[in-house]
Image (cartoon, rainbow, N blue to C red):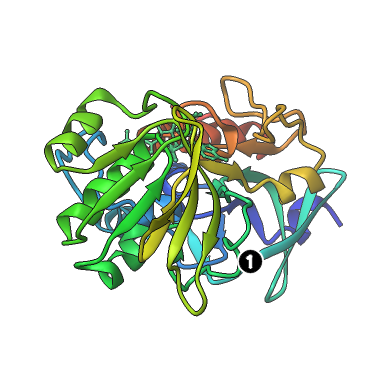
């Protein structure tokens, strides 16, 4: 029996964030029989971004709204399996077997779009008080802290946007705690934080998080004064970047860089024939617009192993 006779799908896309949605649109429109798996309901980390102001065509849009639009568009072109996690993936000759929480599928090509997950501080109290004042998502949990004092840890775009959002929804004092003397965030975002009266604490480390049933205070180290002290807050939002979700990439023996991101060429090919990667899992700029572009390129490049003519 040939590969084509036992194949369920020509292309399997793993992860339904911006890269996965875009790959599905381009694959489906090119006549590729495509399946998309997502362990939750799709949208990736962009889903919980309070607002996005640099996706061309949308001056300002909540991440949830943009992801909703992308999902409505993409589901026209592929079979989407939401809340179905891929647990194992193997390659045998030119056929991939994809084992999910539901069943097993086969495909001739795979695009890895699993994105990233929130990085943890790894300090005492963080795990114990998660959901009791320790959060990684202001959009999800910010409402619980209206009128209360919170801290946001980090100095990148995400942390500063989270801090602005928390101020906007009515948190009392929003303290941005950053380990260096300079933010990593874009100037426009930093300026907005200052205008919105986010308090920025530079050169400060959070050493531990304390509280009995809920967060009560943080133990901070002010590096400038070399002083350690307790700092009272009701909640702490950790926004210190992301880690690639690369477990499936490792199963396929795709090459990773030193930070664990999948290494790709300009056509989104990995080192394994038939395996492509797109979006945040490939590292680099990690923007929604670049994830979409990478998804489109990966889908069209995958035609090379599908015996199909490159459509454009
Ligand atoms: P990021 O840019 O990697 O910034 C992470 C921040 O956390 C850095 O300031 C870093 O400090 C700090 N940090 C890392 N580990 C830490 C630790 N253990 N303890 C304390 N602080 C720690 O991450 P991000 O802000 O999540 O953004 C991820 C990507 O998405 C970036 O490419 C970003 O540009 C993009 N993004 C863009 C937008 C936008 O609207 N343009 C919005 C959100 C995200 P250092 O500065 O000292 O390294």
Quadrant of the rendered structure where residue 87 is? bottom right
Image x and y of residue 52, in percent: 25, 43
Whether residue 115 is visible here, answered yes or no, is: yes
Q: How many marks?
A: 1
Task: List the residue tagged with mark 1.
Answer: 85
Answer with left or right where residue 168 lies relative to residue 130: left
Q: Residue at x 62, y 53 (%)?
A: 123
The residue most toward the bottom is: 213
Q: Front-most of 299 and 244?
A: 244
Answer with left or right where residue 195 lies relative to residue 10: left
Q: Residue at x 25, y 42 (%)?
A: 199
Callout 1: few (<14), some (14-19), or many (20+) C-alpha neighbours within 10 Å?
Answer: some
Q: Is mark 1 within 8 Å of ligand 1?
A: no
Q: Is residue 126 above or below residue 3?
A: below
Image x and y of residue 21, in percent: 43, 50
Helix, strand or loop at label 1? It is: loop
Q: Is residue 58 above or below residue 45?
A: above
Answer with left or right where residue 105 lies relative to residue 113: right
Quadrant of the rendered structure where residue 278 is? top right
Q: Front-most of 236 and 84?
A: 236
Q: Front-most of 292 and 28?
A: 292
Quarter in which the C terminus is drawn: top left
Image x and y of residue 299, in percent: 53, 38
Quarter in which the N terminus is drawn: bottom right
The residue most toward the top is: 266
Answer with left or right where residue 69 lies relative to residue 234: left
Image x and y of residue 232, in percent: 37, 60
């Amino acid at each position: 029996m040939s590969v084509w006779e036992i194949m369920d799908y020509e292309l399997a896309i793993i992860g339904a964030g911006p890269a996965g949605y875009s790959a599905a649109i381009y694959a489906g429109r090119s006549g590729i029989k495509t399946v998309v798996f997502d362990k939750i309901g799709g949208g990736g980390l962009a889903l919980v971004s309070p607002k996005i102001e640099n996706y061309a065509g949308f001056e300002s849009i909540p991440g949830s709204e943009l992801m909703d639009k992308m999902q409505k568009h993409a589901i026209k072109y592929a079979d989407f399996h939401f809340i179905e996690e891929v647990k194992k993936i193997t390659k045998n000759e030119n056929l991939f077997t994809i084992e999910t929480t539901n069943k097993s599928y086969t495909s001739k090509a795979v695009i890895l779009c699993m994105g990233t997950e929130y990085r943890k501080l790894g300090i005492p109290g963080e795990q114990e008080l998660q959901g009791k004042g320790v959060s990684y998502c202001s959009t999800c949990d910010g409402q619980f802290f209206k009128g209360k004092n919170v801290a946001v840890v980090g100095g990148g775009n995400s942390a500063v946007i989270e801090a602005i959002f928390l101020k906007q929804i009515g948190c009392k004092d929003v303290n941005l705690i950053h380990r260096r003397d300079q933010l990593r965030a874009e100037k426009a975002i930093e300026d907005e934080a200052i205008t919105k009266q986010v308090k920025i604490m530079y050169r400060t480390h959070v050493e531990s998080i304390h509280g009995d049933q809920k967060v009560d205070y943080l133990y901070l180290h002010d590096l400038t004064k070399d002083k350690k002290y307790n700092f009272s807050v009701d909640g702490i939002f950790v926004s210190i970047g992301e880690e690639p979700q690369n477990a499936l990439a490792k199963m396929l023996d795709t090459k990773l860089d030193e930070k664990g991101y999948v290494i790709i060429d300009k056509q989104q090919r990995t080192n394994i024939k038939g395996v492509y990667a797109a979006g945040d899992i490939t590292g680099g700029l990690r923007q929604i617009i670049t994830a979409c572009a990478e998804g489109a390129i990966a889908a069209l490049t995958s035609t090379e192993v599908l015996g199909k003519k490159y459509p454009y």
